[in-house]
Amino acid sequence: MVKRSCPSCGPEPGGEEKKGRGNPFSVQLFPPELVEHIISFLPVKDVVSLGQTCRYFQEVCDAEGAWRRICRRLSPRLREQGSGIRPWKRAAILNYTKGLYFQAFGGRRRCLSKSVAPLLAHGYRRFLPTKDHVFILDYVGTLFFLKNALVSSTLGQIQWKRACRYVVLCRGAKDFASDPRCDTVYRKYLYVLATREQSGVVGTTSNRACDCVEVYLQSSGQRVFKMTFHHSMSFKQIVLVGQETQRALLLLTEEGKIYSLVVNETQLDQPRSYTVQLALRKVSRCLPHLRVACMASNQSSTLYITDQGGVYFEVHTPGVYRDLFGTLQAFDPLDPQMPLALSLPAKVLFCALGYNHLGLVDEFGRIFMQGNNRYGQLGTGDKMDRGEPTQVHYPQRPISLWCGLNHSLVLSQSSDFSKELLGCGCGAGGRLPGWPKGSASFVKLHVKVPLCACSLCSTRECLYMLSSHDIEHHPAYRDLPASRVMGTSEPSLGTGAPQDPGGAARACEEYLSQIHSCSTLQDRMEKMKEIVGWMPLMAAQKDFFWEALDMLQRAAGGAGPGTPTPES
């Protein structure tokens, strides 16, 4: 009889006095390869649970050898380890939790169905539904094309075709985009940002990796257009904006600069070649010190989030500008690319952009909504438009945010790691399951959310949720400072005195004590940058202070031994 016990624990009390049972011994006497081999046959969920029982099993279940066997059992075609600190464990969990779920809005069935999963996919990173098909991008850059995935049943309900075929559309993909409108009928072409090997200098055998944009027909997956960039330019994100005849492709470089080019989609299927001009976007020309981290777009506007959490906006039509800001006072029809800074009290992590409203999530997990609120899609509890970001009182911390034509959805996670889906706005057509009349505030929808859901998307016919858990992606939310929790929700130097006479003063005293505790000038500069990010300033003001502190820091670092420094 083998007695499995934790090495840190001794034998069972009284065990030696029991006769007829033999001598118990620990499982640590087994060869490590045998223990890892036994554990590799367990489901991933059971392996994680077993690792939480004691210290010994925590070390065994966290070993890369066991996860390598589990990963190859789940994905036999995966022969190379992934990236990260624990590549095999990350790869195994990615492939175990991957899934694409959908719920049709019409019909009597109100259940969540799981789609056919491509066996070749290494986790799911992004997805995009079109009129009849679904495109999925995995973590190694393979873009899959699920052909004829959605069909109509005899009852007129959209359902998933179990026998649908999936093919590899392309490899080496970084990002992809299509028409930014919510209606999938307009998504005729798929733009894929990828890396391809190009032949080098004439007379040499070396190849260079160059980024390119390939355009595919969503109906058949046929490539109709390709543009290749210079090898010195490396991009990481692509979004589309504008009409079909003046479609602007915005490309974000690794350095945080925005480049754009214009194509005519109505001429892409014609067999000819022409030259397009790649130009630096105005947001990068006017604000060269900014490093853009990500972008979001719809048909007539674009939103930029910087690496410091600032938000800048482009609005190209007067109607959308009026819906978003409530006025046309600052709109310039001759220069629609002029970026506008949004005033926010904290660093913004991610956003969602609808046709005439938007949502922002800051570093404290708070949701801010702005724009048209005719159907209650802002979730503020009323139907009054908001011309500036307004905080929505919402207890949970969101994982994903989505803004549609006239409704909004939030995927959140509670303290027990269970997930729920909330929505607000227009409920016509079943787009808010359980709330056919809609709601002006966020309400819990009648949808069973998968445990590892990470993103969502809604079309006219279906609600989609992508499931894939990445162990290296941890929530970046912070706790609110004590100065914001004690007296008022948003203390500031200008408005803190009437609301909380001592709140802003106590916060500034705490900031000064933190700066004083730093030993060197460089440490004080870094602490001051961090404090500027905490303070409820406008994005333009934060950028000004950060740039000024960088200039002072560079001047102090380059000062000679005889030059007096501010610290002296």
Image: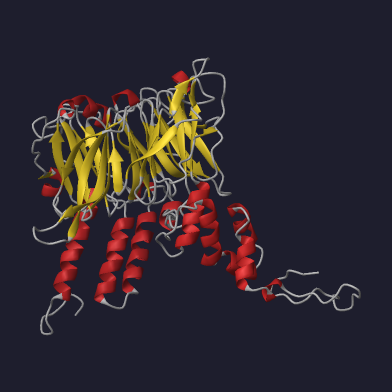
Q: Which quadrant of the structure image shows residue 507? A: bottom left
Q: How is the image coloured?
A: secondary structure
Q: Is residue 530 left or right of residue 196?
A: right
Question: In x, y percent, where is residue 168?
Answer: 36, 41
Residue with the most extreme right position:
19
Question: In x, y percent, where is residue 511?
Answer: 34, 64
Residue 502 appears in the picture as rendered: no
Query: Please, is residue 506 above or below residue 343 in the view?
Result: below
Q: Quadrant of the N terminus?
A: bottom right
Q: Is residue 351 left or right of residue 482?
A: left
> In front here: 395 or 444?
444
Question: In x, y percent, where is residue 472?
Answer: 44, 58
> In front here: 173 or 129?
173
Question: In x, y percent, where is residue 75?
Answer: 49, 51
Residue at position x 31%, y 30% in the image: 218
Residue at position x 44%, y 26% in the image: 150
Residue with the most extreme top position:
155
Query: Please, is residue 132 above or below residue 554 in the view?
Result: above
Q: Quadrant of the C terminus?
A: bottom left
Residue 118 appears in the picture as rendered: yes
Q: How many marks?
A: 0
Q: Is residue 129 left or right of residue 109?
A: left
Residue at position x 64%, y 74% in the image: 31
> In front here: 500 or 104?
104
